[in-house]
Each structure stands twice: as C-alpha cells, then as structure tokens.
Amino acid sequence: MLQPLIDLQQVTYAYPVRPGSAQQESPALRKLSLQIQQGEYVVILGHNGSGKSTLARQCNALLLPDQGQVIVAGMDTRDLASHPAIRARVGMIFQNPDNQLIATVVEDDVAWSLTVLGYSASEIRQRVNEALEAVGIADLRALPPHKLSGGQRQRVAIAGILALRPDCIIADEATSMLDPVSRQEMGKLFARLNRDLGITIVQVTHLLEEAVYAQRIVLMEQGQIVQTGQPGQLLSDIERLRALKLIIPDSLSLAARLRAAGFRIAEDAVTVEQIAREIARE
Amino acid sequence: MNDVMIEVAHLSHTYTTAPVKKKALDDVSMQIPRGECVAVIGFNGSGKSTLVQHFNGLLRPTPGSVRVDGVDVGGAQVNLRALRQKVGMLFQFPESQLFASTIYQDVAFGPQRMGLGRHELRARVKHALDIVGLPLQDYGQRSPFELSGGQRRRVALAGILAMTPRVLILDEPSVGLDGEGRAEFYAYLQRVRQEQGVTTILVSHDMAEVAAIADGLYVLHHGKLVMQGTPASVFAQSEQLRRWDLAAPPLHELLAALRQRGIALPEDVMSVEDAFHFLQQTQKQKQKQLPDVSSRS
Amino acid sequence: MLTNMSPGIFYPGTGPLHRLQARTKLLMIGLAVVVMLIANQHQWHFAPYIVAVTWVLGSIFGAGIGLRELWRRLSFLLMLVFSSLLFTFLGGSSSSPAVWTLGPWLLRNVTISHIALFLAIGCGILALACLLPPLAKRYRSRFFFRLLRSILILVTCGALLLFGWTMGLPPQHTVPLGPIIITRQRIWILVVSFVIFMALYTFSTLLTMTTNPVALIEGLTILLSPLRRLKLPVDDFALMALLGLRFIPTLLDEVEQLQKAQAARGADLLHGTWRERLQSFSSFFTALIQGTLRRAADLATALESRGYRSSGQRTLLYEKPLRRLDYLILIIFGLSMLGSLFF
C-alpha cells in the first residue's frame, strides 16, 4: 500500500493551560489515528470544541503532538527543521478571511510566500498568474484585500497556497463566515482543485451541506474520531448526526423520512440534485 | 394605535467616502408592522446594513424619511439617545464588542446611561440575563471571556435587551456559530419575542436560518428593494434569488428541483412535514393506479 | 469619514513618478529634508526653497493624479499648518529690525462701543435668522449650520458685553491697539516653515500615491540593508511596515463598526457627564485592543503557516536595479538642490 500523505498515529494533544487559570483543560485530541492518502477529498465534521481544528493544525505542524506522532509526506512534524518543507506541501486556510492576507494588493499577497522562499521574479509571476486563474480571480489582481468580499478573500488565500504547488490544502472552518452562495462556490472550487489538479483537500467544518461533495467523512466528537465513511453511508443516519449537535439540512431529513416510509431513495443520494432525481424516479 | 412600527419612504443613501461614490440605497420604501419579525436579505454590499442603521439614527435619512413608532428619525428635534434605547441593535460579531471585566458590568453599560436607580438597574440586568439563559447569580460576576462564542453572543444580546427596546435589530446574528450555538441563539430569541413582543428585524445573507422565524422578507439587491413578501412566496422564486447571489433554503431548492422534474407540488408546501405528507399521498395514489409496482423495476 | 483620511492609498498609474523606483523617491525626500534644514540657517536665501517648490510642482505634474484628488488629501493639513503659522506674527517682540509696523491704532471708547453695537445687532439678527426653519433647510450640512449658529451667538454675546463695558467708560478716552510689528525674521520663519511643511507633506503623499506599498517597503529594506551588518532586524521591520499598511483600512473599518455598536448601546463621547464619557472612551479602547490582539494572534498563525522566516534571501518583486531614468532624476535633483545652497 502507498504511504499516506498525512499519517497521524495515536496523537494526543492538550492546549497548554494558562498559568493562574484554575480550570483543567481536557485534551483536545485523544489517541487519535487517521491516514489521509494523496488525492483524497476528506471532510472532518464536528461541532465547535470537538477537536477538529486542533486536528487540522497538527497536519501542517502548527501544533505538535504531546504523544504519538504525525508524519507528513514522510517527515515527522516533531523535527523542527522539516517545518518549512511540510508547510510548502500542506497549505492551510483559516476561518477569518481577513486575518491571513498579508500584502496590500491581491497579486502581491499570492506572491508573498514565494518571495520569502526566494523564487526568481519571472517564476513568481508565472505561478501567481496560474494560481489566480485556477481560483478564478485574475480580474481582481490589483485590488486591495479590504475591497473584496469574504468569498473572494478566501480565494486569494487559496491562490496563495496554490502558488506553492502544494500536495494538500487544509481548510480550517474556511467557509463558516461566508454567505451560503459563496460557501457552495468554495465547495465546488475544492472539488475542482481535487479533481483537476489532484490536490488533496481536507475540509474542516460543522456544516453537513459541505460534506456532501467529499469522498470520505470523518466524524469527530470530544477529541476522537467517532466514525469515518463515505457521505452516503454517514449522512443517512440522521439521528446519530443530530446527537453530535450538527444541523441537518431539510433536504436530508426529508430524504430520510421518505426512505423510512418505504420510498426507494438510494443512500448515496446526498446533494439536493441527487435527492430530487431519486424522489422523481419513484 | 398605529400598527406600523417602522415606515421607510423613498430612502436613498450615497456613501461619499471616495475614491468612488457608491449608491448604497436607492429609493427604498417599506413598512414593518409592529410586533412582527421580518428579515432583510441581501448579498454583501446590497445595502442591507446601511438600511437598518437608519432605523436607530446611526445614519440620517437624506433623502427620504424614516419614521419609527411615528417619530421622524430625520427630524431636527429627534432625541437620538431615546431613539437608540427604543431601537436596540446587535451588530455583527457582537461578542467581539464586549469590554467589561464582568458580565454584570457589560450588560449594565447601556441601562446605566438611562439614569436608572440602582434597584431598577439590577432588576433589568437580571431579567435580561435570565431571558438569554445566563442567570445572574451564576454568571453575573464571571468574565465574559471565559464563555463560549455562543454564550458571549447571548451576553451581548442581553446588553441590548436590558435597555428594554421596542425594536430589536440583529445584523447577521448567527455567522460563525456552530449548529448548537445557532439553535440556542434562535431559541432564546424566540423567547424574547414572546415575552416582550418586540418588533424584530434580522439582517442576513442566509435565508435558511431566517425561514423558521421570520413573518416577512425584504430582499435587497444593489441598494434596491427587489422583492418582499412571506418567506414562502420569496423562496418559491429560487431561480430569481440565484441571480441576486442568494440561495433559497435547501428544502426550497429541493422543492424547486422536484417541480422542475414534473412533480406538481402546491405552493403552500413549506416544511419537511408538508412535503413528506404530499409525497406520501401522491405515491399512494400512484400505487392505486398501478397495483403491481414491483413489475416496474 | 475616517477612511477619507487614511494615508498610504496607492493609485495605480503609468506616469513618470510611477516609473521611478521607490528607492529613488525615498532618497529624493531624504535629500530634500537635509538641504532645506541646512538652508534654514541662512536668512533671506530663497533659492533652495524656490527649487524645492519647483520640484514639488513638477512632481505633481509628473504623478498624473487629478489635482482635485490631491487637494482633498492635502487641504486639511495645509490649512492647519497655514493657520497655525499665522500666529507666529502675533508673538512677542524680537530683536530683528521691523519691516512693517501696523498700528498702534488709537481708538476712542465711543468708536469701540459703536462698532460693538453694530456687530451685536448684525450677528444677533443673523443668528435669529438661522433659527428660522426655512433657512435651516437650505443648508445641506447640518453640522456646518449648527457651527455657524453657535459662532454667531458667541460673537453677539461678546459684542454686547464689550458694548456694555465701553459705555461705562469716558467716551473720549483713547485705547491703544497694537502695534503689530512684522519683522524680517518672522516673515522668514513663516515662509520657510510653510514651504518645508508643504513640500515634505506633498512629496510623501505623492510617494504613497504613486508607489505600490510593497515596492515602497522593498525600497526601504534596500536602503536600510547596511544596518543588517549591525544585526538589526531589517526584514522583520519591513514585514511590520507591510502589515501596518495592510491593516490600516481594516482597523479603520473596525473602529467605525465599534463606534456604532457602542453608540447603539448608549455610549456617547460628546454628551453626558465626564465620568460617563470617560467610561465610554475606556470601553471603546478595551474592545478595540482586544479585537486587535485577537487579529494579531490569527495573523501570527497565518504567517507561520505561510512559511514566514526572517532569514534567507527573499525575492524583490518590484525593486529592480536603478535605471537610467532613476539616475538621471537623482543626479539632476541632487545637483539642483545642493547647488541652490550656494546661489
């Protein structure tokens, strides 16, 4: 079997307790193991505080495991010297679209990581152009970040990672501050980058709607993985999802009720289109 | 008694902060009935925040007029302080606007400025915190920064409620909250509405979440009021909404998709329940017509 | 309103000033400062200032930015500088010879009281007129209108007081007014400080308007690079400057949002008791600082994740080796400025 791109082995992690604070933090991750293969589209699903963001930050060495180990593309994250190489291969975008853009103009921001690494100016120009084209914001290249909408800013952040030609993009709650249409567009963009460029996508979210495009869903609760599986498999068990404090989109609950009432709706029908097709066939 | 709480007539607003002049509102007229819950919907930059900032005098209506409870907001003699007390407004990410070291102090900030006696002040803070489910005796002396995001947001809501507003404006109240936080926030909001009968105005780009509690919707696009009506009538136009960069709730998208496929869903199907019963019934009828369903597959 | 005044907004363009390297422009400003400060020592030596003003006008022309746009950026500060400089005239006596002496005027009490009465009646009528609603509606800006009204009322009251006071004094007595003595030194200081302020402010405004911020910081980094030998963190400084420029608009937005949020909760910096105002003020800053710290923490994570490191050779996107145009301009500028010191 191939070596996984990201390999978490028995990872335990607790946030350092602030001196003076009385409360004892329980570990954010508890003996968690997860393998992500090159080219996968994985959604990590859980409510706030389930440890999903902590998990994401372990994957590009922003956090280091207390116990266990994380191997990214063959490199151990505990080896500090490997951090630049790990971050060049596994890029990350964050929740707040505002607080991750550094330069004052879109194209400079996309180029920023490359300039730090010392690429030649012509190479940078070419890569920036490609990255801007790939996320579809080439026409906004000369604008300052504060003139963009939230969805556009997240695209700039993605372009900044794409310019590094990474193996994997981790989106840490990257859509939770966006409007529904931008959110759907981000989902489509991730799916396209995954399909066309073969980039591994790890999307961290608390929204079931976003999980429907994934190849694999990882359900998290209290720092552990409760279940992993394909969307069709996991999303049909509405009661369980509800118990994990997730919001169930009405389209899924309607499908589940109809199925329970004897309609033949395939389990892997999870998007609105698929469900509509199944119902209409009846 | 006048049953219109907020009346907007021919309101326009242009931001003069250059380089480019931008028309944020363009001849908007609307009437919001007393005691109702309405939602103002629009994509980024549609002017929805600009519109509601006129309701409590943060922006002056020029040209056009805004009347709140019969009082002209643009009038020369308008008492802004009284107006802002009557029209409470919760901004985006209100939890980031908390500042005091205890929850009690933070909630008391607004009412303190109303010149209340000490007992009255305490009673108001207590009541406001009770409504949002953070009782004074348990939470009053704690720091707001120890709480979760959803709880902090409720503290901010209590800070507004303690001023006993007649109108409550909430700008993107659920952005950034997860499922649980969102459900709790709306549950407490419903309670506020029932107990205090406040007119509630939600400002949002997400229609799915306002569908459950709004009585009426106003859709803004590029500063113009382009659609208004009950949630059902607005959501039925999902094609049109797409063009304004808005998405109907997943259920309505599904219903629209079903109609496209030739299933004659009536207009008044509004909930999962309705849709379920309707689909079940049509299936039963089909089965009557075709007794041997199994032979089809 | 705040976004109106924010500095460092770049206007893309292709004028001659846009084509210069940031280093060239920074060096020019540096040189201008030095030359003008040296020239200050030598009274009545106008040549350096005339040359500087010529360069300012030339670069305004070369920037290709609309005069109106520029005026909007400059007007506020220029007015401020100008009005504050006027007060240098009213200072105490100085040793240098007077060029021009105004007054002293000898006014009889009766004349003063007449002037005061006229002023009181005139302003009083105008102030009353301002209270009338039809006229009030004419003014589009309420703020201006209110300001005008309060000034008029103040003047009326002052004039009435003066009138009452002078009526009680013997009518034919004279009161000396002035003299206002204008010395050569004062004129010199006035002219010189005005030109220095104007030139530097215009130059730096043009610099930020015609230079991409990233280029500006790259230019600054190159100019400061000798300091690396002294183990000073030049690159960290450059990053800080870049983040500063990047987040000015964002923070201004946040300030505005926060002000509105607190106004909605009854906070008011302009009304209420001093204690209330102070409380509003402190709560505003607490929230602002907390927000900024949170932002900074987010940003630090993002920087780390995007591979920031303070060592190593980074690529310069904008700063190329100086071209013929840069050398040409630098040499002409340097020669003309330095030369003007000797003429």
Image (spheres, rainbow, N blue to C red):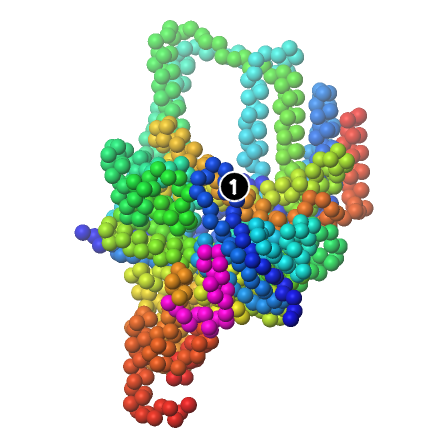
Q: Where's residue B66, x and y in %? A: 32, 50
Label 1 neighbourhood size at 10 Å, few (<14), some (14-19), many (20+)? Answer: few
Instruction: Say left or right for B247 vs A78.
Output: left
Q: Nearer the viewer, residue A151 or C209?
A: A151
Q: Where's residue B266, x and y in %? A: 31, 77
Question: Going 60% across and 71% down the picture, which residue do you hit?
Answer: A195
Instruction: Say left or right for A120 vs C162.
Output: right
**Residue B242 part of the magenta segment:** no
Three-letter code for the amino acid on which mark 1 is drawn? Leu
Q: Where's residue C198, x and y in %? A: 63, 32
**Residue A235 part of the magenta segment:** yes
Give the vertical position of C38 relative to B274 (above or below): above
Q: Which residues are magenta?
A: A218-239
Chain for disc number 1: C
Q: How many marks?
A: 1
- Name the residue carrying label 1: C293
Q: Can the viewer see residue B263 in this picture?
A: yes
* Rendered-image quadrant of the N terminus of chain A: bottom right
Q: Tell me the quarter of the picture where residue A35 sits.
A: bottom right
Q: Tell me the quarter of the picture where residue B142 sits.
A: top left
* Rendered-image quadrant of the C terminus of chain A: bottom left
Question: Going 60% across and 61% down the picture, which residue do you hit?
Answer: A7
Instruction: Say left or right for C91 vs C59.
Output: left
Q: Can the viewer see residue B251 in this picture?
A: no
Question: Going 63% across and 30% down the picture, which residue do you hit?
Answer: C197
Q: Tell me the quarter of the picture where residue B224 sits.
A: bottom left
Local secondary structure at mark 1: helix
